[in-house]
């Protein structure tokens, strides 16, 4: 789902260090960009789901986390993303 994909995007851009510098900034940007591209599936506007301070805290938490904490970090990020209820 969208929450899982966004969480994985943030985690892997930060943890895999694809860039020489700015991995947390780029990961955070891509995370927000992906959520905005899929805003029609979210329960609230992106700005109401996650504020700047929360995003900074998540990015730093992911950067400082141990590799074996990956699933915990992904689940934590996913909990900030509220999706619309599927139509019955």
Image (cartoon, helix red, strand yellow):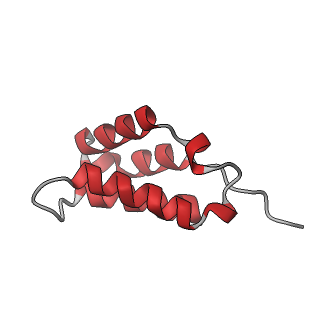
Q: Quadrant of the C terminus?
A: bottom right
Would you say 1 lies left or right of 76 here? right
Which residue is at 56% across, 44% downward? 47
Foreground residue among 17 and 47: 47
Confirm whether residue 80 shows in the render.
no
Q: Quadrant of the N terminus?
A: bottom right
Image location of residue 8, percent across then percent down = 41, 60
In the image, residue 71 sits, relative to residue 38, either above or below, namely above
Image quarter of residue 26: bottom left
In the image, residue 19 sits, relative to residue 68, either above or below, namely below
Image quarter of residue 10: bottom left
Image location of residue 73, percent across then percent down = 40, 46
Image location of residue 6, percent across then percent down = 47, 60
Image location of residue 82, percent across then percent down = 65, 49
Q: Residue furthest right?
A: 88
Count of numbered circles on the image: 0
């Amino acid at each position: 789902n969208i929450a899982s994909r966004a969480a994985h995007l943030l985690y892997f851009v930060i943890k895999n260090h694809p860039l020489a510098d700015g991995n947390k900034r780029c990961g955070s940007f891509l995370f927000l960009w992906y959520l905005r591209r899929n805003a029609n599936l979210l329960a609230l506007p992106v700005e109401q789901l996650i504020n700047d301070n929360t995003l900074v805290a998540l990015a730093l938490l992911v950067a400082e986390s141990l590799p074996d904490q990956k699933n915990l970090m992904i689940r934590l990020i996913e909990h900030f993303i509220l999706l619309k209820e599927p139509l019955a």
